[in-house]
Image: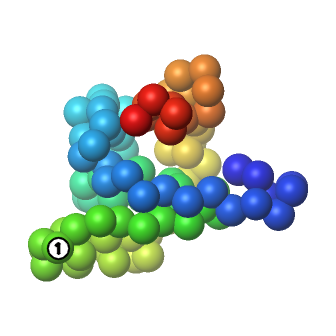
Amino acid sequence: MGTTLGIAVAACSPPGADSVPHDPVYQSIAQELGWTPGQIALRRHLQRGGIASPKTTSPHRIHQDAAVFDFMLGPRQVARIDHLDRGAGRTGPHPEHL
């Protein structure tokens, strides 16, 4: 994620803005671990050294976002998510096309 160049990648799009909540891989991992697909996506981003800026005003969602520090994804789970790469190193829309 740019760490070899000393660059941190920021995520400011909420997980619900793309296909993450409906993706079978995220749903499966979320069910395995007892978290939501959005929490799985946020945890993956943080584990890769990214900077996350979740956007919500809902107290429930704020609590969910903070809970991503209560668990870690295992290597198999990370590999399953990494296989979702859609050719440009991301699972959502390209930033230039937002």
Identify the residue position indicated by label 1 in the image.
57
Q: How many marks?
A: 1
Examine the rendering and report whether any part of residue 80 can be seen. no
Quarter location, residue 18:
top left
Residue at the far right: name it: 4
- SS assignment at label 1: loop
Q: Is residue 90 above or below residue 88?
A: below
Residue at the far top: name it: 87
> Which image quadrant: the C terminus?
top left
Q: Residue at x 71, y 50 (%)?
A: 1
Quarter location, residue 24:
top left
Left or right of residue 6: residue 89: left
In percent of width and height, residue 37 lies at 29, 48
In percent of width and height, residue 86 lies at 53, 22
Q: Amino acid at mark 1?
A: Thr
Examine the rendering and report whether any part of residue 77 can be seen. yes
Q: Residue at x 27, y 58 (%)?
A: 35
Q: Nearest the camera: 54 or 43?
A: 54
Q: Is residue 41 above or below residue 87?
A: below
Q: Residue at x 45, y 29 (%)?
A: 97
How crowded pointer 1 is (Cα within 10 Å; few <14, some 14-19, many 20+) is rated as: few
In percent of width and height, residue 61 lies at 19, 69
Left or right of residue 4: residue 98: left
Q: Residue at x 60, y 21 (%)?
A: 87
In percent of width and height, residue 80 lies at 51, 34
